[in-house]
Image: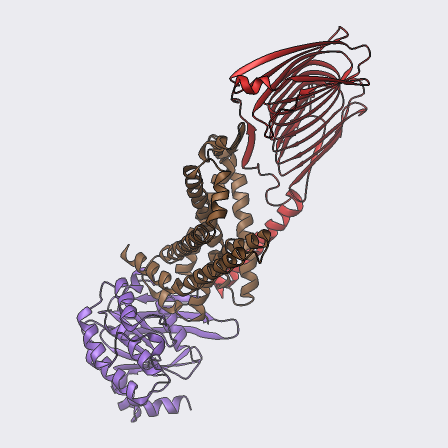
Chain colours: A purple, B red, C brown
Amino acid sequence: MSKASNALVVSGLRKKYPKVEALKGVDLSLPQGEIWGLLGPNGSGKSTLLKCVVGLVNPDGGEISVLGQAPSRLTKAQIAFVPEVENLYRWMTIRQAIDFTATFYDDWQEDRVEELLGFMRLDPTKKVSSLSKGMRARLKLILALARKAPLILLDEPFSGIDPASRDRIVEGIVRQFKSEEQTMIISTHAVGDTEQLFDGVVFLDEGTINLKGNAEDLRTQYGRSINDLFKEVFA
Amino acid sequence: MKIRRITLAVLLLLTVLFVADIRYFGGPNSTKQPSVHFNVSPGIKAPAVEKSQSFVNSGEELSSLVLKGQRGNVELRSTDTDQIVVHATIGADSEEILDTFEVVETIWGSEIRYEISEGQEDEMPEVWLSFVVEVPAGMEVSVEQNFGQVRVHNFRGFLSLNTSFSEVTVWGLEGTASIQSNFGVLDLRQIAGPITLNDSFSTSKVEFLTIDGGYDFDIEVVNGVLAGKAPFQMDTQQNNKLVARGQSGDGVHPVVIRSSFGNVTVNLKDFEGTRVD
Amino acid sequence: MRRFLQLLKKDLQASLLPVGFLSGITIILFGIVRLKMASSAWPMEASLAVIAIPLVFLPLWLLWQSFQTLRSEWREDTVYTLLVLPVPGWYVMTAKLLTIWIEYTVLLAVIIIGTLTFFTPLVRFGMQVVPGISWVLRNGILLYLGSLCALASVVIFVQLAFVVSKMVGRLQGLVALWTLILSGWLVDRLGVLLEPAFRWLPSLPLHKLFRLEELEQGVVAEWNLAPEIGSWIGVLAVLVLTSYLFEHYVEVNG
């Protein structure tokens, strides 16, 4: 598969923090138009990999190609990234957070915003600081899904949120994802109910890839669900 | 980790350069010219009306002359006669003010003094006082002058100048000079003898003639610039201080210069060494 | 431009609370001093000293604020938002610089208006020793513009210090402080090095600019621009470097 037809190509990616080597030469290529699960336990390097792709940390070695381009300001405009941390300005209202984000992206779709706000059951006049963790997670997702970004990266979008919010987020992803135009990578350590989302999965452990493949093929090959496979690999 | 190492390496390199700069060049500002220079305006407002007074005294029993001028010019020269000749000019904005002032001559022992009389009003109006003076060679002359010009030509004797916001020109001096200047411009040429110069916020240029016994240079410039062509070595010290020491000949005649926030240039005529900047 | 203005708006909205708080404190302080002066409870010297507190405190607060505005992005994890925006680094840095300028202007205006309102007799007394209102306005504006330049250089150094501290793993506070010292020194040296190249520039006659001759005859103050130009080029270079590092090399907390 050529670089151009891949949404993301990573080769020999290394990243070392002062106390730990987070990525130990990761090679990966993910095709366009699919939803991929980046699976692994805490500290396996999932977040670091996504941060390298989006430019939040600098790799120590290796190469990254996002939609055929090296990471730059141009690729930032093509990526919608939802980090695991609370990255919203707490003094903003939901509407202000939406308007703020909308200014920076040409692929912003205002009509989608109203639809998503309604679906996610969020009141735009509310302040971010007054929202529950689940509501904030839903707002972050709105800010990513309201864009027609070719590459969407969701870092632990279900971490620490209530089941109701999780279901709504999963449903939101399914409804908004446009497979002919977009690619999505979801990193998570809780596969559970979300495995039906994935077209393909990558198992990452201590900075190296254990397993990678089409979700359906893996289920057939190993005769069990991705969730069970995950539990077995990382037991 | 790579970028961290590069960052730390750059910081380390700059630290080494910083320490070397402090150690060998005196650190920041040590060689930097002060940005703001104070100077004296050549165009001081002229008085509307003037009157003159002249005084002639024998210099046989008088050895010291004191002149207290203001907002005007002082011209001083030595002559071969033994007469002290003083032409004083008082200026004011109006006749009424002018009438209330005059130049007062006071003799006290061997000292003769010229200054303006005290006015009748509580508040002193703007009054100009200029002098043109000739004194016998070897006399001690002390001049105080604010806001004006002091010109000394071919002076032989002991000269003491205390000026502020003034332009001082001394062309030809045989004897001893003690000069204090704040916010001024000093141009001292053909100086032959020991000199003590204290200035602040001033631009001072001193040119010495080669004389028997030579000079002993002791110069300190704080927050300023020192340059010149004379036999001294310049050393940069802490607190933006430049120190220069050296001798010509036997170093008999002391040259003491203390300057702050100013430009000092010291030259010794016919000196063959290199210029110091 | 729209994106830059949005960043500026965001920074300005974030500073509403601290600026509002400080403005309120200043007005209350002036009110208290006014009451004390009216009742002759405080000697004039003490009152003047207290009136001067906000003006003395202002540069320190601005220095802290220039550091704090970046620090809060990391502390509150909003740097994740900032760093993924497809904008050049100088948008972020100059938006923050402009915000500091506006904060300074607002607080200065509060101090001036407060002084004029609460201490009118004092201001009238002060006006007697200066040539006139136009002289005060002209020189006030010139001093204000000068202070903006001085403030900008400090903010730019602080920004570099902070960004560099985020590029090392440990001892970030010490690294920031040391970078601040080194950058100041480096810019100073650059001024000295480039000074010969700008000697052709005429001196700036400060006495004419500030109309000092109206205060005292004969005073001439001239600003030798040659060593300053190099330093200002250095400050601009620091801004460019900081923006570049911020866009390309700075990292979120690991």
The reply to whether residue A208 is in sight is yes
Query: From what the image shows, is residue C174 above or below residue C206?
Result: below
Front residue (pair A124, B132): B132
Q: Is residue B228 left or right of residue C40?
A: right
Query: From what the image shows, is residue B182 above or below residue C118?
Result: above
The reply to whether residue B275 is in sight is no
Q: Tell me how many marks there are.
A: 0
Query: From what the image shows, is residue A96 above or below residue C223?
Result: below
Percent position of residue C18, x then y: 43, 64
Front residue (pair A10, B57): B57
Farthest residue toward the top?
B81
The part of the image, by quadrant, that contains residue C137 is top left
- Tell me which residue sits at (27%, 87%) in the image: A167
Percent position of residue A115, x then y: 18, 76
Image quadrant occupied by the N terminus of chain C: bottom left
- Tell me which residue sits at (56%, 54%) in the image: C47
Percent position of residue B17, x then y: 59, 49
Front residue (pair C242, A99): A99
Q: Is residue B185 left or right of residue C204?
A: right
Query: From what the image shows, is residue A121 above or below residue B122?
Result: below
Percent position of residue B35, x then y: 54, 37
